[in-house]
Amino acid sequence: MRKALYVGICGITLAVVGGVVGQANASVLNDSPKVDQAAGQEVTVSTFSELSTALKDTGVGSIKIGGDITFTGSILDIPQRAITIDGQGHSLKLQYFLMTGALGAAGGTLTIKNATITNLDALGNPVAAFFVTPSENWAVNVAGGVDYTGERFLEVQNSVVTFSGKNMVHTSAENAWVRSINFASSSEYTSTAATEGEFAAFYFNGDLVGGKAVGKVKVDTQAKVNITVSPNNDSEFYYPAFYDKVDRVDVNEGATLNITAAGHALQFIPRGDYDEVPSVNVEKGGTLHLVGHGTANYSTINFQQPNSQLNAKEGSTLYIEGKGNKVIETAKNSIINITNADYDLRNSTAGSPIFECQNTFLNFSGVTMSVWDKTGGDYSGLPMFAWNTLKLSTIIQNGDSFNTTSTDDAAQQYFHSILFGRISGIVTKP
C-alpha cells in the first residue's frame, strides 16, 4: 500500500458539489452532515486487506485502487470523514459482502468514482449492497465512471445522494435507499431497477425530519437521467421510480428525465406528513418523458395525494404514454398545468381514455391542440380536431371533462376528454 501526502482536494470538490445542490433546493440539504474537510493522506491499494485498512484509517482521505480487488469479507463501521475511492478503471468484486458507515455525529461523505462494481446474490440473506448506513450524518457522491451491477447499490435511507459525471446502475432490487437525490448538472445516469421482484428504483424510506417527509429529486441543468423499472414484468405489483417519502421532482433547465416502467412511472402516495404540496416541475428546456406499460391496469402517473401538481413550464417538453385503461390518475383538487410547452398525452390501448381523475384542474396556455379518438397504437392518422394557439381550462372528473372554458369557441364546445386517446400540441412562437 503506497502512501502520499493528500492536500484536501476531495474536501474542496465535495464542498462545491454541496453548493450546487443548495442552489436548487435548500430543503434537500437541510439534514446534510457537517464534514471535517481537513487534509488527509492519499494511498494506493491493490488488495482487499489494504483497502480495508485504508478505509478504517481516519488519517486517509483518498484511496486509489491499483488493481482489481475481490472482497473476502465486509468492511464494517468505516469512520466518518470525507473519503474518496477512485477505482482508476479497476473492478471491485464484492461477491455478497458490503461496506458500512459508522454511526455518530461527526459527519462523513463517501465519494466513489471510476470503478466497475459487482455484487452477487446474497443467497437468502438480506439483499446485498455496496454501501450501507442508517446514519443521517453521511452523504454519498457517486462522482462518475461508476458501473454497478448487483442486488442493491446503496442503503443510505437518511442520506442525500449526488450523482455527478456519467454512471450506470443495474439492480435486481432498488438502485438505492435514499432521503433525497441530486442528479448534478450535466451528469448522465442510466439505470435498470427491479429486474427481479417488487421494488422501486429509489426507495425514500428514511426517518421523518421534524415530523415531515422531506424527500426531493432534482435533475439539474443539462442532466440526462434514464430509468427503467421492472423491465421483465415478472410480478403483478409494480412500484414507481421514486417511492414513499418523496414530495417533489424537479427537472431543471435543459435536463431530461426519462422513465419507462411496468406500472406507475411517477407516484405520490397518500400521506399527511409531506414537507410541501407534492409536485412535478419541468423547467424551460427540460424534458419529462414517461412511458408506463400499464400492466395490471396501472396508470403512468398516479397522484394519490390530494392537491398534487404537475407543471410543464414555458419552453419545456412533456410526453406521457400509457398502455392500460388510463394514463393519468389523480386525487381530488390536483392540478395539471401545461404552459407554453410542447406536450403529448396518449393511451396506446384502443378504446381507453387518458384520464381517471377526481376533481382535477387541467389547464393549457399558449399551445396548439390536436385530439384523436381512442384508436390506440401510434395515432398516425389525422386528429378528430386541431385548434390553433389557445387557452383552455377544464375540470376532469373520472374520465370526462366539465366546465370547459377556452379562448377558442370550437375547443370549448368539443373538448371532452373521455372521447380522446391522445391530446398533443406545441408551443407557438410569437
Image: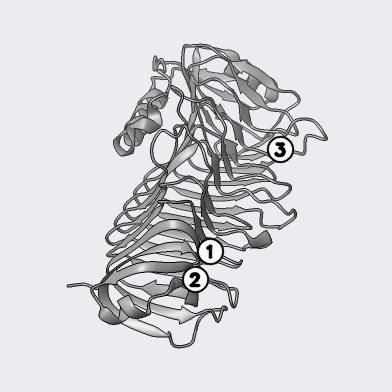
Left or right: residue 134 compared with residue 120:
left
Q: Where is residue 206 in the image (x, y as percent from the top left)?
A: 55, 28
> Tag 3, which secondary structure?
loop
Which is more toward the observer, 53 or 127? 127
Whether residue 232 sits left or right of residue 270 in the image: it is: right
Location of mark 3 (residue): 119
Q: Quick one: label 1 or label 2, which is nearer the N terminus?
A: 1
Q: Which of 175 and 65 is in front in this view?
A: 175
Mark 1 lies on residue: 327
| Tag nearer the camera, 3 or 2 | 2
Residue at far left of view: 430
Q: What residue type is labelled 2?
A: Arg
The part of the image, by quadrant, that contains residue 317 is: bottom left
**Residue at image location 50% in from the left, 66% down from the top:** 399
Considering only order in the chain, which callout, 2 or 3, is on the residue closer to the N terminus? 3
Q: How is the image coloured?
A: one colour
Q: Estimate the x, y position of residue 209 in percent, counting from the top left.
A: 45, 24
Q: Nearer the viewer, residue 102 or 426?
A: 426
Q: How far apart are marks 3 and 2 (CA)?
A: 39 Å
Dot 3 alpha-carbon crowd within 10 angstroms: few under 14, some 14 to 19, many 20 or more: many
**Residue under label 2:** 346
Whether residue 149 sits left or right of residue 266 in the image: it is right
Q: What residue type is labelled 1?
A: Val
